[in-house]
Image (cartoon, coloured by chain):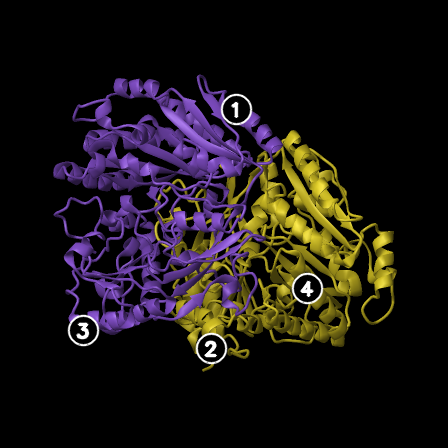
Chain colours: A purple, B yellow
Amino acid sequence: MTNVLSPPISEPVLDAFRAALPDGAVLTGEEELREFRDPFAYPTWDEYTASAVVMPTTVEEVQAIVRIANEHGVPLWTFSQGRNNGYGGPAPRVKGSVLVNLRNMNKVLEIDEECAYAVVEPGVRWFDLYEAIKAGGHRLMLSIADVGWGSVIGNTLDHGVTYLPYGQDMAMQCGMEVVLPNGEVMRTGMGAMPGNKAWHVYKRGLGPTPDQLFMQSNYGIVTKMGVWLMPWPQCFMPCWLRAWKQDDIAPIADTLRKLMLDRVIEGVPGLYNTLALASIMSRRADWYDGDGPMPDDVIDHIARELELGRWMTRFALYGDEDMVDLKFRKVKEAFEQIPGAEVWGTKCAPEDIPNLEHPGERIVGGVPSLDWNYMTGWYGGEEGGHIGFSPIVPLAGPNALAVTNLLRGLVEQEAQLDYIVGLLAVTARSFANITMVIFDTKDEPQVRRAYDTAKLLVRQAAKEGYGEYRAHLDFMDLATDQYSFNNHVYRRFTETIKDALDPNGILSPGKQGIWPKSMRSG
Amino acid sequence: MTNVLSPPISEPVLDAFRAALPDGAVLTGEEELREFRDPFAYPTWDEYTASAVVMPTTVEEVQAIVRIANEHGVPLWTFSQGRNNGYGGPAPRVKGSVLVNLRNMNKVLEIDEECAYAVVEPGVRWFDLYEAIKAGGHRLMLSIADVGWGSVIGNTLDHGVTYLPYGQDMAMQCGMEVVLPNGEVMRTGMGAMPGNKAWHVYKRGLGPTPDQLFMQSNYGIVTKMGVWLMPWPQCFMPCWLRAWKQDDIAPIADTLRKLMLDRVIEGVPGLYNTLALASIMSRRADWYDGDGPMPDDVIDHIARELELGRWMTRFALYGDEDMVDLKFRKVKEAFEQIPGAEVWGTKCAPEDIPNLEHPGERIVGGVPSLDWNYMTGWYGGEEGGHIGFSPIVPLAGPNALAVTNLLRGLVEQEAQLDYIVGLLAVTARSFANITMVIFDTKDEPQVRRAYDTAKLLVRQAAKEGYGEYRAHLDFMDLATDQYSFNNHVYRRFTETIKDALDPNGILSPGKQGIWPKSMRSG
């Protein structure tokens, strides 16, 4: 299951793509292709590079691309915006693949105020949908990811996290249109019935529901998706909980679970360690110039200076003002049982969210920005990079403590890097431990050490019973290797479906460890 | 795609099943098989009848059954409890199938109080899980269906409705174990990693999520499932809204949508017409002895006498008492904008729910019973039957009005039966229009008319853009025929997967319109 080299793309194939697409929609220049590498790999590394980029604007053009790829046996690699930079960005798993860049399919097709949903194309970014809602005068909120340049569809297909109430348990996707590997267009759920009125208000149809099969896979190219929106509450209240001791993570996790199980806290709260928030507000060099991991006393200094404590928890309350007041009292009472913990928040009307100073508060209010990108500059400034390592963990004190101690030890001792983490409570019962391995992309040994450490984390976490919810290109195979129950039956199941739907193996070979028959060893 | 007759089962095959299973676990007697027919079909009809019943008690026995079926080309038809009586009960689509009866796999394997979930086998009924939670002293509530004898897994696999907060958008399933058509055991989500701690707290794994593929399909036999439970709230408040005019359904639907979108009302409210609730409290003969549909003045008489109005809406509030009080004020204020509408409810502690007099209030409190079975006796008393016809409709006034008027007209004019309906708001944006076509099973022409009318409803509703969320055996093919977008691409997609996973076509052929290659025409 090592990387498979495909032959360089031939002129007749490029001509076929050019004939099927608008002028300028096929890129092959070296300079043009540079944009579509793993953005944080060391510049001379060339394992995950493409041979061409095709940019369809319509569903019919996507179908044409798929047909040409089948005819010529060309591996495609699809991305919507390709901004999942901590996981490899738009780069393909198989060197020489043709990138299907969906950024030009960027229409917001529908916004339904009454039933509170939108229908979007894959190129639509958080920014675009937010602006379209505003432009239409709709009093609706969108659950967004950290950085506004990402694709709504792309993030969803990667099981990406968003933070508002519909972010919890990934509730917001409803109804898809997909181009299958054979070039046919399918609609899921109620959309499989022509003229059905419930396509974007009910997530199933009659028969098995395929939507989740098109997430984290290579079974089709999603060309439309329904997105549930939340009507404006009367009152929005971003809140913070600050705690001063490293081990406070345990009682925080337990208290948060109870508040989420009782639906007092909705959405996806984030528990950030000192350095996670410090990296948004400052540079490492402002505090420390040592080579190894930052010592505890420096972290404590930052914790005091930036008033971050050792853990800051961000969450928000949404509802009528009397409801929000009641919930805030309950939350404050519960969290302040933890010695030294403080809870605060400031209410505002939905129309005032864009004016909030703290980008973290705007994010839970559904207003996108690029502010959190600053984080990756901790070491390298403009040239900073990061790798995400993200196992799922039960939202319970002992687990939270065990996994943060384990990963901190590995990041500090193996990579000699600072431990920067956000624990995102993606359901009331579990959190994604988003370990941000941040490095200076100009420092090759540091980049190499970061990539190698991420692989070590995959193995060590799996030994303790924690699995990645999403994997970087560079260790997709390794991460899926850990899902080995009953002699890898799940992988063989996904391969059986792959071979049936995509016999020529043209769609994103290797994506999430799913390889077509022709590229499988053994 | 007409019914396919399989050859009668041979003695060597029965011997193989007997050798693999405990004594008495293979039934073939005519009397024994009678229990497993479509319970409401006229007694002489024999289209959906089995040749044998096998009753495994372990996962290994399920695997053995699947292997024997593959070896001998025997069609199996699996059910958990087989109590979905309005949709055909345990009966197989293909005459002569061997029923895999999972009632003896009835263990509650785990109840986790901290993370609030249970893990069950397919034979576990609502009754069983409720009792196990009680016996363990767990302060956890289960979202249940109307009738307590059904299987938790079986209901989930059919996209069945439950009523508590986790019933909304079918939120409660988390993690499965499945015996695949080739006899291998697979675990989904995080369960695909041996020893993973998050199998039942996070619904995905790494790669595509197959769980929903095993619902309403014939791709595997589910042998374990995680079920999310809700910690006891301080206060439970079952509530009712009564409205007196037939057209009030429109403002009720609009108001309910807003309250659900704002999460003031959680769970799955039900909007019942007069006769739906009258059928739980009385018999038709108590009110009317005419042959055709009951006239409006008689319905109005019942509405007054039983104090039901023309529409009764049931919902419940859950939370700390101050939260419930606040929500109740909001709900009452909103609904009482509708002229003549009245809202009431009574608070109680969770421990007192079993003592509530009204079975409908116990259901939204998670306490199962058989009381709502009484409904089917409207015409025939003990011999009553019903067919469920259940399209999904946007939760909006004009749609609610249009679909109830359409279906009422068809049921009354074509079947000459009373129109009995519950609109179940399965999400904040949509409801399942559960039309209960109720008849006397001893009256063959009435039964035939009911079955024929259901098929007419399927066609007519589809013309208006409304599709079934679940289909009775007798019109599974017809119902799936309506999902015909792009020359039935969705059906062909499900067939492609079927053929890949189950090349011998042994698992539940014809289930939800999915036929294996050997049984497909054309």
For the residues tagged 3 and 4, is the chain the same? no
Circle 3 Cα neighbour tier, 10 Å, few/some/many (<14 / 14–19 / ≥20)? few
- Identity of the amino acid at label 2? Met
Identify which amino acid the numbered label 4 is placed on: Ala
Horizontally, is A114 left or right of B298 in the view?
Answer: left
Q: Residues within 10 Å of mark 1 (few under 14, many from 20)?
A: some
Q: Nearer the viewer, mark 2 or mark 3?
A: 3
Q: Which residue is mark 3?
A: A12
C-alpha separation, residue under disc 1 versus residue under disc 3: 66 Å
Residue B402, numbered circle: 4
Q: Residue at x 25, y 51 (%)?
A: A477
Residue picked out by circle 2: B519
Both marks 4 and 1 on one chain: no
> Which of pointers 1 and 3 lies earlier in the amino acid sequence?
3
Return the chain for callout 4: B
Share a chain, discs 1 and 3? yes
* The N terminus of chain A, quarter of image: bottom left
Q: CA distance from mark 3 to mark 4?
A: 56 Å
**Circle number at residue A332:** 1
Eyeballing the image, is B3 above or below B194?
A: below
